[in-house]
Image (cartoon, grey):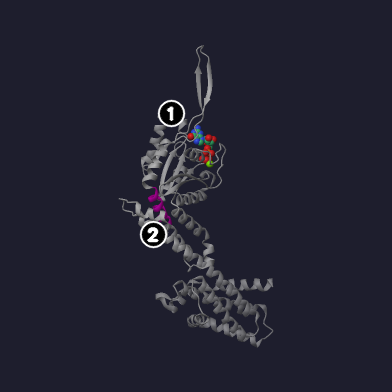
Amino acid sequence: MRSNLRNLLFREKTTTKVNPEQHLLEANRNIRELIEDTQIPSSVRAELSAEFEEISSISDKLLNGEIHIAAFGRVGVGKSSLLNALLDRDAFSTSPLHGETKDEDRENWRTLRDGHVVLIDTPGIDELDGEEREMLARSISHKADITLMLCEGDLTDSEFRALEQLCRSQRTVMLVLNKSDRYTRTELEALLQRLEDRCQDLLPAQRIVGASAAPRPETVIQIDESGKETETRRHAAPDTAVLRERLWTLLENEGQTLAALNAAIFASELDEKIATRIVAARKSVAEKIIRNYCLGKGLLVALNPVPVTDLLAAAGTDVAMVIHLGEVYGFKLSRREASKLLLTISAQLVALMGAYWGMNLVSSALKTASAGLSTALTATAQGALAWYATYLTGKMAQSWFSKGKSWGNAGPQQTARRILASLDRDTLLKTARQDLLTRLKGG
Ligand SMILES: Nc1nc2c(ncn2[C@@H]2O[C@H](COP(=O)(O)OP(=O)(O)O)[C@@H](O)[C@H]2O)c(=O)[nH]1
Ligand SMILES: [Mg+2]
């Protein structure tokens, strides 16, 4: 563990119920565990790469003691200008035209005792449609410890919804009424009051502040002794004093606690999300594998005129499929173990579907009798049965692996019944036939 992380763990004392030290430890442990989990096969890792990237970036952020502040809001409300005003330099490009900020952009702001503060600029929310906007809001609130939601007047409906979404994510949000220079003092006070009223269920009043990031130049009229008027334009300095003061107090008092809490919330949300995604990813990879073996075995049976070879080669295919499926669930099976599992599975399937397995054998026998004469159609029908049998075998094996190499409370017989009941046999056989015919016709 790096020393700044250790400092952070033991320095902060809090009176609230949540324990940030605990959260940070937990968050970091969860994050590392997920990254290093060798149980997750590489094919599944590939499907989860975006999530893994997010985890590593938040983990790095924690280790470096970074606190992120992101500006969020409609195009042209002055997000880039406000961050520049905080930085005292023009780091982010601004424009009176729409959509200057295309991607997320970042700059270092200031240094804290045990880390530093990073400012993050984002594209405008109104250039994205509903779903994209929601995704942006979510991804920003994941990464940002403090989100500055900017507006330039009363909130529009979509601004209000975006603010609600941000606040719901349990992170720290400040609402900044920018371009205050455009209002008289009375107007400004009334506007701030209106925002406080509208947002009273979302934000405490001290989290709502006015600012002028890039006020318009002031027109100064001077009258000389002769009574002649001259008009000059005077540069107006940005006013972010209240915002700075509130932000700084927040950072000094709670900065690292916020970062730790944020990481903890992030990690637990991600944990949940990843667990579900891993289950889903394994399922879809397994399904693809099963389908491939179904086709392989179906073709083998359909094309091979010698039934004994059919069966032997087919058994070899099943062993390979079971070993392959095991890998997806993080188990390395020997051929012997795979064969043992296949014996259990086929015993169940034979018991439950005697007729079908019988038919499979009968059609194999038929094929011998009419050696060389079998039409594409009978060959396909036989292949389709082999396809279907492989599918059931694969599903049984998948169920066994997904319960950690066990049949669970249900046992193999119940499992077979459940799988059979959940599948639509006729549709699957039709799929099998089409699958095989496409391949046979295509060469
Ligand atoms: N009057 C006034 N104009 C501002 C203020 N802040 C930004 N602007 C102007 O608003 C326009 C859009 O600013 P920009 O920072 O690019 O907005 P963004 O799209 O939210 O990043 C620019 O022309 C800025 O000069 C302000 O406080 N007062
Ligand atoms: Mg911008």
* Tally of marks: 2
Say which of marks 2 and 1 sits in front. 2
Name the residue type under label 1: Thr
Q: Nearer the viewer, residue 183 or 396?
A: 183
- Magenta span contains residue 256: yes
Q: In the image, residue 77 lies at what x, y percent? A: 50, 38
- Label 1: state its secondary structure: loop
> Alpha carbon of mark 2 to alpha carbon of mark 1: how far?
50 Å
Q: Is residue 37 left or right of residue 301?
A: left
Q: Quadrant of residue 318?
A: bottom right
- Label 2: state its secondary structure: helix
Q: Residues within 10 Å of mark 1 (few under 14, many from 20)?
A: few
Name the residue type under label 2: Glu
Q: In the image, residue 195 lies at what x, y percent? A: 40, 38
- Location of the N terminus by quadrant is bottom left
Q: In the image, residue 286 lies at what x, y percent? A: 53, 70
Q: Is residue 113 left or right of residue 434?
A: left
Tell me which residue sits at (67%, 86%) in the image. 371
Tell me which residue sits at (38%, 51%) in the image. 257
What stretch of residues is rendered in magenta? Answer: 255-266
Q: Looking at the picture, does residue 307 appear above or below residue 94?
A: below
Q: Nearer the viewer, residue 67 or 159?
A: 67
Q: Is mark 2 within 8 Å of ligand 2?
A: no
Q: Is residue 416 left or right of residue 203?
A: right
- Magenta span contains residue 15: no
Mark nearer the N terminus (2 vs 1): 2
Residue at the far top in the pictured view: 226
Residue named by callout 2? 26
Label placed on residue 184: 1
Q: Is residue 75 visible?
A: no
